[in-house]
Structure formats: structure tokens, C-alpha cells
Image (cartoon, grey):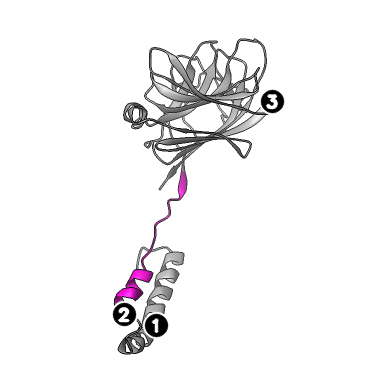
């Protein structure tokens, strides 16, 4: 039993004890034609439940450019054209008002991935799209979730390197600060705002083929260099 954590040792010992204790009863019942050993082992089969494990996390206690900075778990940020900056040792924002402006880390997986960001929207321009999350990115093409600032909407779309396509929208109550959580369990993308599920989208087989192996996730803005992020977390099913 060496090398097995204590809770698992206890569980295994209990399991062995139950089998030893129950076996004579099963044998007696089997002699009466009621229970068979195969039934016992069929009932004792174990089901593995995935446990989301943090693989990227950042509270942005950084200075200067975000590009090349590492998060608390050692992942390196890559800026994909947004000139992302650290602000005050506690937040980040895009430094350029472009679309798309995203910064990502490679989390090593694309299915069973859960991304959480805390953001503050700062309204300065009517035609700014707002802040959000970058999903399934290879640096050039990616899915994204944008928290619209003017229309009280969440927008799910994709950028294929040549243009942006809006795939789904949902109305939400307007608020200055929000926590957005995006769950990617291929082919499904689920968007949760402040604990409430607001949007679910099922990717086509073509979209899964084009994006499903991309393992970069991160921050996104659409023509917005004012809104800020103060927390980023990615968990992956293990």
C-alpha cells in the first residue's frame, strides 16, 4: 500500500473488509440460487468522476507589459496584438483599441476546460464591444465570449483569422462588474455570468475539427482598452 494517500488507503482497506465480510453471505445465498459472484463484482465496479484541477491562475500582481509574464502556476502569457498592460499591480487591460485583442496561456487541454474571469467594464466609447474571454485559441483563430457594454448582452462568436462571426447572444442585466465562467465540454460551450447560466452553444463537427485541438485560453476585448480584469482561472478535468 506504499505510495497511496491515506484517504485512499482507508477506502481500499474498507473495500477489502467489505468483500471479506460479505463473501460468506454471498456464497450461502448462491447455494440457494439467489445471488451469483458475478453480481457482486458487477455491483462493486467503480465509476471515475473527473475533478476540475487548476492549471492556470493569475491575480495580476505584475508590472509593465503582460506579454512574457508568468501566472502563479508558471504559465507564460502571450499577447496576440492587444498590447496588454499590467495596471497598479492588481489588474490588466488591453493597451490598444483593436478587434480582436486577446492574450492567452497554453493550458495543455481543450476538452473539459473551465475558465473564470473577474472583470470591470469601463464605458468610454459607444461602439466599443467590451471585455470577455478567449477560448480554444491558436493565437490567430479562436472562439470568444464578449460581455457587451451598451446593449446588456453576452455574445459568443468565433474569429477564423479572416473575420468575426457572431454565433449566439443572450440578454443579461447590465452591471459594471461581473464574473464570467465559460465551460468547454466539447462540443458544448456554456456561459455563466455571476452564477447564472445565460448561454449554451453546441459546436458543429466542422468547428470541433477546426478549433477543438486548440489549447490556448485567456482574455479578450473588442475595441476596448479601458475595461479591466483582476482575476483569471482555468481548471481542467483530470
Residue drawn 50% across and 14% down?
A: 83
Sequence-wise, the earlier of marks 3 and 2 is: 2
The residue nearer to you, when weighing 43 against 116, is 43
Q: Real-space Cα distance between discs 2 and 1?
A: 12 Å
Q: Are marks 2 and 1 in contact (CB under 8 Å)?
A: no
Examine the rendered structure and indicate whether residue 1 appears above or below residue 237.
below
Q: Position of residue 198 (x, y in %)?
A: 58, 34
SS at circle 2? loop
Report which residue position mark 1 lands on.
22
Sequence-wise, the earlier of marks 2 and 1 is: 1
Q: Quadrant of the N terminus?
A: bottom left
Residue 36 is marked as: 2
The residue nearer to you, when weighing 18 against 38, is 38
The residue nearer to you, when weighing 139 against 65, is 139
**CA neighbours of label 1 inside 10 A, class few (<14), some (14 to 19), many (20+):** few
Query: Quick one: which residue is furthest to the front in this view?
Result: 33
SS at circle 1? helix
**CA neighbours of label 3 inside 10 A, class few (<14), some (14 to 19), many (20+):** some
Q: Position of residue 108 (x, y in %)?
A: 37, 36
SS at circle 3? loop
Q: Are marks 3 and 1 in contact (CB under 8 Å)?
A: no
Report which residue position mark 3 lands on.
174
What segment is highlighted magenta in the picture?
38-53
Sequence-wise, the earlier of marks 3 and 1 is: 1
Residue drawn 62% across and 16% down?
A: 226
Q: Are marks 3 and 2 in contact (CB under 8 Å)?
A: no
Q: Real-space Cα distance between discs 3 and 1?
A: 59 Å
Between disc 2 and disc 1, the foreground one is 2
Examine the rendered structure and indicate whether residue 5 appears above or below residue 151.
below
Q: Position of residue 49 (x, y in %)?
A: 43, 54
The reply to whether the magenta stretch includes residue 16 is: no
Examine the rendered structure and indicate whether residue 49 appears above or below residue 205.
below
Amino acid at each position: 500500500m506504499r505510495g497511496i494517500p491515506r484517504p485512499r488507503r482507508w477506502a481500499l482497506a474498507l473495500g477489502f473488509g467489505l468483500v471479506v465480510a460479505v463473501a460468506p453471505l454471498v456464497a450461502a445465498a448462491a447455494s440457494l440460487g439467489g445471488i451469483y459472484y458475478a453480481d457482486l463484482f458487477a455491483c462493486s465496479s467503480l465509476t471515475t468522476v473527473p475533478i476540475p484541477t487548476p492549471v492556470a491562475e493569475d491575480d495580476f500582481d505584475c508590472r509593465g507589459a503582460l506579454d512574457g509574464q508568468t501566472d502563479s502556476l508558471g504559465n507564460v502569457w502571450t499577447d496576440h496584438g492587444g498590447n496588454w498592460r499590467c495596471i497598479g499591480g492588481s489588474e490588466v487591460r488591453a493597451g490598444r483599441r483593436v478587434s480582436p485583442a486577446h492574450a492567452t496561456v497554453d493550458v495543455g487541454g481543450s476538452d473539459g476546460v473551465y475558465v473564470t474571469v473577474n472583470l470591470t467594464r469601463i464605458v468610454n466609447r459607444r461602439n466599443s464591444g467590451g471585455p470577455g474571454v478567449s477560448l480554444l485559441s491558436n493565437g490567430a483563430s479562436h472562439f470568444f465570449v464578449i460581455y457587451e457594454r451598451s446593449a446588456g448582452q453576452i455574445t459568443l462568436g468565433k474569429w477564423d483569422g479572416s473575420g468575426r462571426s457572431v454565433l449566439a447572444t443572450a440578454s443579461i442585466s447590465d452591471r459594471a462588474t461581473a464574473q464570467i465562467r465559460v465551460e468547454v465540454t466539447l462540443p458544448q460551450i456554456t456561459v455563466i455570468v455571476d452564477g447564472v447560466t445565460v448561454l449554451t452553444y453546441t459546436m458543429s463537427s466542422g468547428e470541433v475539427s477546426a478549433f477543438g485541438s486548440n489549447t490556448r485560453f485567456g482574455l479578450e476585448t473588442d475595441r476596448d482598452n479601458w475595461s479591466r480584469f483582476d482575476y483569471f482561472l482555468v481548471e481542467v478535468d483530470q
